[in-house]
Image (cartoon, helix red, strand yellow):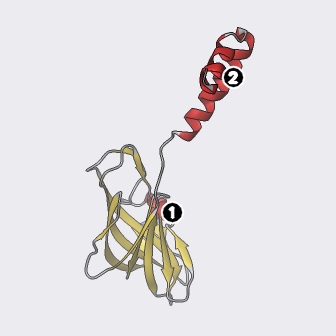
Amino acid sequence: MTPIVRMMKRYINMPLKYALPLLFICALVLSATTGRTTQTTETTKNLSGGNAATNAGVDVSLTSLGKMASLGTYITAGTGNTFAVYNATVKNLNAKDRSINEFNFKMRDTAGNIYNVDLGATAADGAMKAVTGTQPGDIVRGTVAFKMPQGATPKNVTYDDNYDKITINL
């Protein structure tokens, strides 16, 4: 008899009170090891008038709207600050149930400072909003705005959704 057959006979004759916990543990281990695997990829592109930055799972496009002191009537950058504003388009190329979020964008200036999308600017008309459960082919559009000091010069914008990381040089 082979060792595997001997082991199977031993477990077949095992009392149920021992076999069920063993089966449960095996099921947990199996489900933990067969989950979805992810691969993070990184791309760098240059912005010239508009962009084209395609990665494994998403296509990200930015068009600069320039620097602005305010977004609408109520959202202002404040004294000494300005908003760097971009029209952003993110297309889900091939992932089921991918979330696209305005907070996946970060901007770096030429001095190395990093800026998140301004929370107040997300309330502006036309601002990009988070969309969950997008399917291949879905497109999310809107503006993203970064509050920064007036003298700062934007260097690049990075879109990072933990699956794809795309840096667009400005």
Looking at this view, name the residue that lies furthest to the front: 1
Disc 1: CA contacts within 10 A as few (<14), some (14-19) or many (>=20): some
* Residue 101 visible at all: yes
Q: Quadrant of residue 102?
A: bottom left
Across and down, in percent, residue 15 comes to 73, 9
On the image, numbered disc 1 is attached to which residue? Answer: 120
Mark nearer the N terminus (1 vs 2): 2
Asked if residue 84 lies left or right of residue 92, the reply is right
Disc 2: CA contacts within 10 A as few (<14), some (14-19) or many (>=20): few
Amino acid identity at mark 1: Gly
Question: For the N terminus, which image quadrant?
Answer: top right
Q: CA distance from mark 1 to mark 2?
A: 53 Å
* Residue 132 visible at all: no
Q: Which mark is residue 22?
A: 2
Q: Is residue 92 above or below residue 118?
A: above
Across and down, in percent, residue 83 comes to 45, 76
Seen at 55% across and 77% down, the residue is 114
Q: Secondary structure at mark 2?
A: helix
Is residue 128 or residue 158 the one in the foreground?
158
Q: Quadrant of residue 93?
A: bottom left
Is residue 98 or residue 26 the one in the foreground?
26
Amino acid identity at mark 2: Leu
Tell me, yes or no, whether the two marked residues, 1 and 2, touch with CB atoms within 8 Å.
Answer: no
Across and down, in percent, residue 31 comes to 56, 34
Is residue 166 or residue 123 the one in the foreground?
166
Seen at 28% across and 74% down, the residue is 51
Is residue 164 or residue 84 the one in the foreground?
164
